Image (cartoon, rainbow, N blue to C red):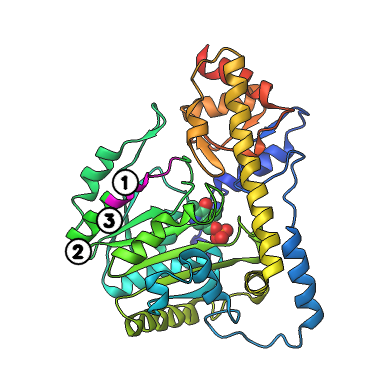
Amino acid sequence: MLSDLDLLAPDAILGLSAAFRADPRENKIDLGVGVFRTPDNQTPVMKAVKRAQTQIVDNESTKSYLPPEGAPGFGDAIVNLLLSEKHPAVKDARALAVQTPGGCGALRIGGELLKRAGANKVYVGEPTWANHKPLLSAAGLEVIALPFYNKENCVIDFDDFMSGVEKLEADDVLLLHGCCHNPTGADLTREQIDTIFDAAEKQNFVVFIDTAYHGFGEGLDNDAYMVREAARRLPSTLISYSCSKNFGLYRERAGALIAVGESADHTKALISHMTSLARGMYSMPPGHGGLIVSSILQDIDLSAMWRSELSDMREAVIGNRELLVKTAQEMQLGDELDFITRQRGMFSMLPVTKEQTEIFRDKHGVYMTGNGRINMCGVNTGNVEALVAAYKDVVLS
Ligand code: PMP
């Protein structure tokens, strides 16, 4: 039986990183994998994380099991950070969270919970993050794509998206990106979010919001508009949260699944299902990352330090966007790349074909995913002119 299993192709994004490392060209440019990087290509441990980590190691007295909800204080700290203490759903104890192994764990448990509740179909805008489909279909949901982004014009095609959304029925699920859309960087406006929630109220479908870049777009409060509105307006909603990027904790696997229920008792019921689903999959999340996050968020000084470091990361990515657009204008590309400063978060998507991404790689040593997604962290003063020249050659000549 086991001998029937054939070798699978390597994961596309991880394969891209391996190809980049193996490329001997000195002027190669890595716009591939989705992690924050400084101009010298480092993904540093944040100072607030280092401090919290030292305190945890110094004071740790046991490695005994955590409860299935995760590190003490973690869930409340994330709910307060994302929704704020004064949010009506928080005040009414209708918003609670369990810690999960990263945002991926939250998406999978959320998918399982929706399936258990009777959902069969989850709708996603096209394109979406490549791992949404595997995670949600592994939970038994059918993942259906709706038109979302117009790649030629580099904007959201909202009318097209809404014509799809209008067909959703009660018991269907709509997956939205809370902020900093991956892979396009194209975020919905507040007005557009309100229109989607009008439809959710009218048609009674469930909104599941994936938030993996909180704080990377316009700041912690502005980036929370969608989730705060969902928790305020909709009878119930689910939110997956990742601490991988905004705390730089990638390999520690820290994330959360937040349930907002119709009443405090309903939310408790949802949490009881989440912990029972976790018990059947991995029992409980890893402790270290969650302890770091809760220690930071529960300490005024560490929290201030973390906010300032996050704000520096956000400004750095915005600076890279501006640098690329300014350089493109200076190198006579007109407004060709202007859309990049209108987008948010780590990613934008170039209007290129898969074949063109291969020419970028083979001829110019510029690595991006096959759909044209670029990580803006890979752009810097040392490579931006070469990047624009490559764009001119591959796309415009
Ligand atoms: N959702 C999106 C849109 C993401 O980009 C990511 C990370 N790349 C995740 C969820 C999950 O992140 P993790 O499991 O690493 O916390």
Callout 3 crowding tier (Cα within 10 Å): few <14, some 14–19, many ≥20 = many
> Residue under circle 3?
197
Callout 2 crowding tier (Cα within 10 Å): few <14, some 14–19, many ≥20 = few
Q: In the image, what residue type sits under mark 2?
A: Ala
What stretch of residues is rendered in magenta?
A: 186-194
Answer yes or no: disc 2 within 8 Å of ligand 1: no
Compared across the picture, whether 316 is left or right of 44 comes to left
In the rendered image, residue 231, in percent from the top left (x then y), is placed at 36, 66
Q: Residue at x 27, y 64 (%)?
A: 120
Whether the residues at callouts 3 and 1 have beta carbons within 8 Å, the answer is no
Q: Residue at x 21, y 63 (%)?
A: 204
Label whose residue precedes the other's in the sequence (3 or 1)? 1
Q: Nearer the viewer, mark 2 or mark 3?
A: 3
Mark 2, secondary structure of its residue: loop
> Residue under circle 2?
170
Q: In the image, what residue type sits under mark 3?
A: Phe
Measure how far apart labels 2 and 1 are at the Cα level.
Answer: 23 Å
- From this view, report whether residue 94 is shown above or below residue 130: below
Q: In this view of the protein, can residue 64 be seen by the observer?
A: yes
Mark 3, secondary structure of its residue: helix
Measure how far apart labels 2 and 3 are at the Cα level.
Answer: 14 Å
Q: Nearer the viewer, mark 3 or mark 1?
A: 1
